[in-house]
Image (cartoon, coloured by chain):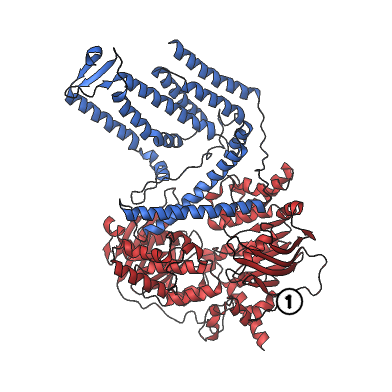
Chain colours: A red, B blue
Amino acid sequence: MHFISEDYHNDPKGLPLFELSGVSFSYPDGKEALQDISLRIYHGDRIALVGQNGSGKTTLAKHLNGLYQPRKGKLLYKGLPMQDEQLNVVRLEVGVMFQDPDDHLFCNTLYDDVAFGPMNQGLPEELVEQRVKKALTDAGFAELMYKPAHFLSYGQKKRAAFAAIMAMQPAVLILDEPSANLDPKQEKIFREMLAAYEGTIICINHDLLFLYGLCERAVVMSNGHIHHDFSFNDLVSHPASLREHGLDFSFRFSCCQSDTPHRHGKKSAKDSGGSEGKLQNVSPALLELRDYHFVYPDGTIGLRGVDMALRQGDTLALIGENGAGKSTLASVLLGIEQGQGEYLFEGAALNKKRRQELWRRVGMVFQDSADQLFCPSCWEEVAFGPQQLGCSKAEVAERVSDALQQVKLADYDQRVPLNISGGERKRLAIAAALSMRPEVLILDEPTAGLDPRGEALLLEIIKGLPMTIILISHDLFFVQSLCRRAIVMNQGQVIRDYSTAEFLHDGHLESVNQLDFTYKNSCGTEIMALQEACLA
Amino acid sequence: MLADARVIQLPLAQTVSLGLGLLISLAFLVFHRHPDDEQSSQRHHHHRDGEPDWSVPAIDDHADLHSFFHDWDPRLKIASLFLYCFLVVSIHSVLWSFVSLVVSVLAIMASHLPWSGSIRRLMAMSGFLAMFMIVMPFTVPFRPGETLLVVEGLSRFPFHVSGFLLALKVVFKAMAIALMMEPLFATSPLAVTLNTLAGLGIPKAICQMVLLSHRYIFVFLHEMKRMYRGMMVRGFRPRTSFATMRTVGNFMGMLFVRSFDRTQRVYDAMLSRGFNGTFPSYVHFRASGVDWGKAALWIIIGLSMLGLDRMF
C-alpha cells in the first residue's frame, strides 16, 4: 500500500477555486468519512474522483457544494470560507448532479424544473425563459417542455436533470456516476455534452473508460484519505494502483492475449467473421414464444411478432437499446405480463394456472437490486422465496446457506440489506433468486452500478451458475464471457438471433439499433498501450 | 309506530324482483364499457392478472385547453367556486340538490374536460355514498305522519321514505361538489393553482408540500410497483395469513425508508440549486372584467339556488 499524494499542480495557476486543508468529517453515527483531506482544485481542472465504494468520494463532493460543513480543517471557495453569503454563492455557481435523476426533477413540469435554478439565481424572467428553452432544446426536450418528468425514460430523465443544472451556467460541475444505467447510445450523448462544457469538472465514476479523454487529473480516495493526486493517464498506466483501489478493469481485455479474432474497436487482420461457428444446442426447447405480441395499456407496443426458443443449458444475451423490448420480453417469460401469441413451456402451451406457477421455474434479478430487497435481514431476504415455495424449515435453512455461499455472502445472515454496499446488495438479490433453484434465471443489467472489483466477482459467480441463463446487458464483455447466443432487439422485434461470436462480428448492428459498442473497446486498447509503454 | 304512519304495503316477490333489477342495471351502468371506451378503459384500468390499476392521474393533465374555466383568472375562479360550493352545501331540499348536480355536470361539459377523471372521482366516493343510501332509509328516527314502505313479511324493517330522501340529498350534494373539483383544479397548471391558494391565505409551506407530493406520488407508485413485482416473481400472493401481514409490513416499512432517503436527497438537490426555503415563481395574475363577470355569475347561481330552496 502506498500513500503517494502528490500536489498535481507543481505550478499553481493562481488562486485555486477550491482549497481544502486538513478537512475531516464524520457522520452522526460516528463513521469517519473524510480524514485530513488537503486538495486544491483550479479553474478548468477536469478531475476524475475515483475509489472504492465507501472511500469518501460522495462525501467530498457534498463538501465542495456546501451541503456538508467540515468538522475540522479549512474549506475555501475562491479564497473565502464556505459560510453565510459565500455559501449561497457556492450553491449558485457549483452544479451537482447526483446519481438518481428523479431527485433533481421535483417540479410539476420540465420547464419548472429547469427554471428552478436560474430563478433562484435572481435572473429576470425573460432571461430565465431564454436559458430554459435553450437548455431543454439542447437536451432534445423542446416538445416536452410542459410535461412532467414521470413521462420520461431513465436516460431522458438524466439528460433533463443535466439540463436543469446547465441552465444555471455553473462554473463548476460535480457529477456522481453520470453514466450509471445508461445504454451506450445515451452514454455517448452524455459524454458529448460533458466534453462541450468548458468549466471545471469533478466526476465521480467507477467507469474509467467513460472518463478516459474527458478527465485530465485523477484524485484517488481510499478510507477517507486521498491516496493519489496525479494525471489521469498516470493512474490508468499503473495496473497496481488500479488493482489496489478496486479499479482494475483489465480483466475485461484478457481476450487480447489470445489469438482468437474478436471485436476490439479496430478490425483485426485475423478477423475471419466468426470462429465459434453456429450454435449446437439440440436439446428440446424449455421456453418458446411464437408470434408473440404485447401492447401496453397506453397503446405502446412492447413486443411485435417475437419468435424465440430457449433450450436447457442455453446462455442467452438479450441486447438492444433502452426501449427495445428486452425487459418486456423478460416480464412475458416470467408470466407477469400476458400478450397475444403462443407461449410454450416444456412444449405445452401455458394456461392461466401454469402461467401463475411460472415463478417456481423462472427467476429474475432486477437491474436495481433495491427493488427486490424488503426484508430486515439478509437471511430473511434469501429465505423468502423458499418459504413461498412451501419448503420445510430445514430445507429453507439449507437453501439459504447454499445460496449465500454461492454469492460469497456466507457471514451476512443478520446484516441489514440496506446497510450493505451496492455490490453486496446485487449479490444478495442473486442469492434470493438462487435459493428458489429456478431452471431459468434472468439477469437484468447485473453490472449496473458496480465497480470493477464488483464486476469481476459477479462474473465469477455467474459463470459458476448451473441453470439456463438469460442476460440482459449492454456490457459486451459480460455478454462475450457468459453467453453463447445473442438475441438483438429493436422496437419490440427480434432482429437477430445467432451466436455471440456472430454478433461480435456483425458490422451492421450499429446502423440498426444505433448502439456503439466499440468506443469503450478502443479506449481500453489505448489504455493498455499506455500500460505497456510504462512497463517498457 | 306503524299506526302513526302512512304505511304502503309492498308484495315481497315484486319488491325483490324490482330490487334485483335495479342492482343489475346499476352494475351494468358502472361496469359496462362501450367499444369506443375500450381504449380509454385500457389506459386507465390496466388489468394484469386481474389486478386493477390504481395509478393516480396527474391533476392538471388537461390544463392546457381553452374553455370558460381555463381562461378564467385562477384567483377569482377558486374564490367564487369555493363560495358556490358552500352555498350548495347549505341547500335543504332534494330538488335543488339535484339541480346543483345538474349545474356541476354542465360545468364539466363547459370545461371540455374528459369524463374519465370525474367518473374516477365519483367512483372513489361511491362506496361511502352507497352506504348512506342503504343504511339511512332503515335507521332514521321515526316521525309521526311520515310515509313507510313495508315489504310483506318484513314489517320489522320498514323503509323510511324520509330517510331515503335525506340520503338522496346527501348523495346529490356530495356528487355536485366532487364534480366541481374538476373545473376548479384541473383547468390550471398545478403550480399556478397552488400559487393562487398561497395568495388567498393558504400557508406557503402547505402549498409547497402539495406540489412536491403531487410530483413524487408517481415516483413512489413506480417504486411500489417494482417492489411488488419483485415480491411476485418470488411467489408472493397475498392471503389472509400472518405471513402475508408480515410481508406487507416489511414492504411498507421498506417503502417508508426509501421515501425517507429520497426526501433527504431531493432536499440536497434543491439546496444545490440555490433553494432558500421558498419555491421561486414568476406567475402573474391579471383579472379582467370578464373574469369578474364570471365570478359574479357563479355566485348569483349559488345564491339563486339557495334562495329558491328556502322559498319553495
Quadrant for the N terminus of chain A, please. bottom right
Q: Where, by quadrant of the figure, is residue B45 drawn?
A: top left
Image coordinates for residue A14, horizontal then vertical, percent? 83, 66
Image coordinates for residue B76, horizontal then vertical, percent? 60, 27
> Label 1 is placed on what type of residue?
Glu
Number of numbered discs overlaid on the protein picture: 1
Q: Is residue A173 above or below residue A311?
A: above
Q: Is residue B103 above or below residue B48?
A: above
Is residue B238 visible in the rendered image? The answer is yes
- Residue appearing at x 41%, y 61% in the figure: A329
Image coordinates for residue B104, horizontal then vertical, percent? 47, 26
Quadrant for the C terminus of chain A, please. bottom right
Q: Where, by quadrant of the figure, is residue A197 drawn?
A: bottom right
Q: Nearer the viewer, residue A354 or A453?
A: A453
Is residue A447 visible in the rendered image? The answer is no
Image coordinates for residue B201, horizontal then vertical, percent? 62, 31
Q: Nearer the viewer, residue B243 or A373?
A: B243
- Residue appearing at x 52%, y 86% in the figure: A258
Q: Nearer the viewer, residue A441 or A56?
A: A56
The residue that label 1 is drawn on is: A6
Farthest residue to the top: give it.
B311
Judged left or right of residue A106, residue A378 is: left
Judging from the image, mark 1 belongs to the subunit labelled A
Q: Where, by quadrant of the figure, is residue B277 drawn?
A: top right
